[in-house]
Image: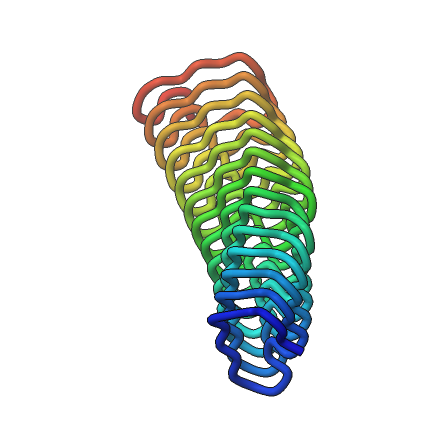
Amino acid sequence: INTTGSYNTAMGPTALDANTTGSYNTGIAYRALSANIDGEKNTAIGYNSMEANTTADNNVAVGAQSLQANTTGTNNTAVGFDALNDNITTSGNTAIGNQSLSKNIAADNTAVGYLSFAANTTGANNVGVGRQTGLANTSGTQNTFIGERAGIANTTADFNTAIGAASLLANTTGHSNTALGYLSLVANTTGNYNIAVGRDAMQANTTGTRNIAIGFEAYDASDTENDNIAIGHQVMTT
């Protein structure tokens, strides 16, 4: 079908077989870029990678079924099995790791790690680095989760920052929290505007809001109280 498209590389059954005017594309493996018509500068390597792409440009998909549903979304990078699989029209996403951002249909997300932000659908401008970071997030936006299972239970909450393995682990809808350190704010579910800095800082808090804890195990006794400040090694602990 190719008419005027130039500098394309296709290897594998039906790879790039619908291309007409698109140029500078690479499709390697069965059905890689098979629906592409005039999209340009795309790279698809792996079974069914970028299979549905038609007119979108500047995408990279490496891994079976990576960016499989994408049609017009641009400037996306997907590396790993099922990475960004459901993405259709949105742009500016980066997913590295098997099934990272696999359900995503939003823009400008970055997920690095196995199952990172795997359930995300409409949440935008999120960052996840580490295995299962932001795993349950669906529509929460502007979240940053770094460290294994950081923010794993977050679903719809926005503006959270969790750096450290298992930080903000149980958080579901609590928003505007900052947790820095292993297990910091680990039990928080719906509490908002909390700041915890240090290993195990504010680890018992569940619904308390506007609390500040800085230091190892600082303020780790209370779970529901509000407007407290604890600074120092094991300050305000049991």
Instruction: Give me the residue at 45% from left, 19% from top.
Output: 212
Residue at x 59% of width, y 23% of height: 192
Where 143 falls versus 70 (above or below)?
above
Q: Where, by quadrant of the figure, is residue 154 drawn?
A: top right
Q: Position of residue 114 (x, y in %)?
A: 50, 61
Quadrant occupied by the N terminus: bottom right
Pick out the residue farthest to the bottom: 13
Left or right: residue 228 compared with residue 102? left
**Where is residue 84, by image quadrant?**
bottom right
Image quadrant for the C terminus? top left
Q: Nearer the viewer, residue 113 or 110?
A: 110
Camera-nearest residue between 184 and 99? 99
Across and down, in percent, residue 77 comes to 50, 57
- Residue drawn at x 52%, y 38% is 168
The structure residue drawn at horizontal position 68% and vertical position 59%, both measured from the top left corner, is 71
The residue closer to the viewer here, 123 or 171, is: 123
Judge left or right: residue 14 versus residue 181. right
Classify 114 as above or below 202: below
> Of residues 8 and 128, which is closer to you in this image?
8
Image quarter of residue 151: top right
